[in-house]
Image: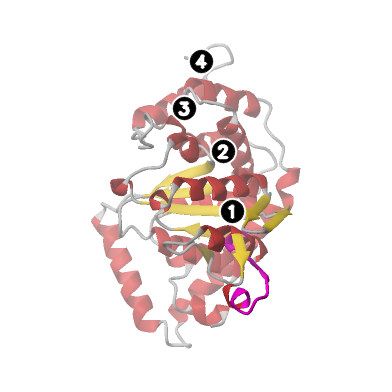
Amino acid sequence: MTARSTGRRILPYSLLVGQEELCTALEIAHVDPAVGGVLATGQRGTAKTTTVRAFSLMVAGELPVTLPIGATDDRVIGGWRVEKLMQGAAEPEDGLLVEAADSVSRILYVDEINLLDDHLVNIILDVASTGLLGIQREGRAEHREQVDFTLVGTMNPDEGGLRPQLLDRFGLVADVAPEEDPERRRRIIETVLRFEAERDDPESEFITDALARDQVRKTVLDDARSRLGSVAYGEHTLRDCARLAAAFRLVGHRGDLVLGRAARALAAIEDAPTVTTDHLRRVARPALLHRRAAGESGTLPTWTAEHDQQVHELLSAPAGQEQ
C-alpha cells in the first residue's frame, strides 16, 4: 500500500477536531527528539491512535512502527530468523527498536503501554533515551549505537498505570479528554462521516485540501527542526525551569531539562528567535503532569486550574520572591 493510498484510509491530520494538547506534544517531540517520548493518556474512544497515525503520515508519509500486543523480547530487541534456524543457519533479525530507528517516521508506537511487562517497557524507554541497544540473547551478543527513535505510547488510566520511574522517562504527557462541547462533538461526527464517505473518491476536494494543509504543516515543522539550534533561551528561561521543577518537587533533573527543550521547540515552531516565558508556561503542564505521580501505583494526579495559576504566579514573580 502506497503512502498516498494509506493517507486516504486515515483521517488527515488537519481534519482532527480537538486533540490540541496531544498534537502540540507530538510536534514538539518531532522538532526536538531530545525532549523524549510522548505519552497520551485518556479513556477509550478519544482518538489517541488516530491522532498518532495521522501525525506520522503527515510528517513521514508512512504509519509509525507499531509494537503488537503480546510482542516477545526477540521481536522487540532482535533475535534470530526462525526459518533460518530451522534450516540449521543462524541469521540475525532486527527487532522493532531498530526498525523504528531505520524508518522514515522514526516513531515507535505502543498502544496500551501500561499493559506491557515492566521489563519490556524498561528496555524500550532505556533505548529511546540513550540511543544504545545491547543484545545478549541465546548466542547473540551485539552492541548497536544510534538507535534513535521517538517513543509514543498511549494508555487508558482506567486499566492501570505505569510506575513513576517509567512515567518520568517520557518527556511529555498529553491528557486526552472526551470533547464535552456539543458543537465540537457535532464537528467530529460530521468530519468522520464525510471522510468515510469520500475517502475512496480520488476527486474529493474535501480530502485533497486536507492533505494539502498537512503538507503545509509538515513544512512548518521541518523548518522549525532545521532552525532549532538558532533559537536562543531567554535571559531567565533556565532559571525559571529550575524554579518550576523545585516548586513542583520534581525528583532528579530530567523534568528541568524537558521544560527547557520543549519550550525551545515550541518557540522554533512559532518562528520565534528566543524562548519566552509564554512558551515555558505553555509546556509546563505536559512536562510536569506525570512527574507528580502519587505513590507507586503510577496514577496521574489531576492537573487543576490551581496548578496553572501556580505556574503563572511563579513565572511572573521576580527571582527570590517565588512561593
Image: magenta residue range: 84-97
Residue 291 appears anywhere in the view: yes
User: Distance from label 2 to label 3 (Cα)?
Assistant: 12 Å
Residue marked by disc 3: 311
User: Distance from label 4 to label 2 (Cα)?
Assistant: 19 Å
Mark carried by residue 307: none
Which of labels 2 and 1 is toward the front? 1
User: Distance from label 2 to label 1 (Cα)?
Assistant: 22 Å
**Disc nearer the start of the sequence (4/3):** 3
Above or below, comparing residue 67 to residue 115 in the picture: below
Residue marked by disc 2: 279
Dot 2 amino acid type: His
**Disc nearer the start of the sequence (3/1):** 1
For the residue labelled by badge 3, is the local secondary structure a helix, a strand or a loop?
Answer: helix
Residue 85 magenta-drawn?
A: yes
Q: Which one is in front, 95 or 221?
A: 95
Asked if the residue at tag 4 contacts the one at tag 1, i.e. Cβ–Cβ closer than 8 Å, the answer is: no
Q: Residue at x 51, y 43 (%)?
A: 172
User: Few, some or many C-alpha atoms within 10 Å of disc 4 (few <14, some 14-19, many ≥20)?
Assistant: some
Q: Residue at x 65, y 54 (%)?
A: 135
Q: Quadrant of residue 217?
A: bottom right
